Image: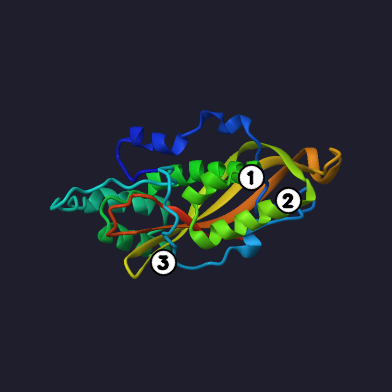
Amino acid sequence: MGIFDDMTTVVTLAIAVFIFFRLRSVLGKRTGHQPPPVDPRDAARRGPANQDGKDGNDNIVTLPRRGPGQEAPVREASKSDAVIDEIAKPGTKLNHQLKDLVAADPTFDPTTFIEGARMAYEMIVTAFADGDRKSLRNLLSREVYDGFSAAIAEREAKGEQVRASFVGIDSAALVSAEIQRNEAQVTVRFVSQIVSATHDREGKVVDGDPEQVAEVTDVWTFAREVRSRDPNWKLVATEAGA
């Protein structure tokens, strides 16, 4: 989602209305049944974003573009600080991190970022369940994509299929916001409710429960180059949350 004040700019994140009718997979910590036989997080390592593979225009979160010679907008300190103070308690590490990020990139708005991250989360989970490598390639860093792709390949080799439905996201909270070598990295903790079951070639359930709603907790990190004209944020790291 773009870090815009105008929410109409998030339409690029909702590129497919049909995502609510497509299969979802379950990523992260589950309660109520055993984890799936394949978890793409096993191959995803925490680290800086890799911006290779930028084919396509699908975005996770989009920042406004700046034209040649156009200066960054002046930071409205009182307004942005007030918003940050509502999200992270003043004096905390996260509060300082968010203010540092806004200082480096005045277009960053944590509230609209969270909304975009929620959309991105469901889009990525959906694409993984569908085995949609094309969509994943545009949404993930190279190393995370390689992990997801390997998990999909293993599932395909076994003839397994995920049948699931996304009940909803209970919460999406910022965990950290850092700038490393001009790269912004923002980590979000998601808690969602998903119904998921994995079926074998004969349609027999080998994992999960098609009638059980499972709680899923994931901690995902998104990144982009602050000085880049490319507004795309990509998923660069995943891990199960406690």
Q: Is residue 84 visible?
A: yes
Are the residues flagged by discs 2 and 1 in contact, CB closer than 8 Å?
yes
Mark 1, residues whose alpha carbon is within 10 Å: few (<14), some, or many (≥20)? Answer: many
Residue 236 left/right relative to 99: right
Query: Which badge, 2 or 1, comes first in the chain's sequence?
Result: 1
Image point 41% across, 59% down: which residue?
A: 51
Q: Is residue 3 above or below residue 145?
A: above
- Quarter in which the C terminus is drawn: bottom right
Query: Which badge, 2 or 3, comes first in the chain's sequence?
Result: 3
User: Given the image, on which type of amino acid does mark 2 rest?
Assistant: Arg
Q: Helix, strand, or loop for circle 2?
A: helix
Closer to viewer: mark 2 or mark 3:
2
| Residue found at the far bottom of this picture | 181
The percent coordinates of residue 211 (x first, y second) are 79, 35
Image mark for residue 2: none
Residue to which mark 1 is pinned: 131
Residue 105 left/right relative to 62: left
Image point 53% across, 48% down: which residue?
A: 136
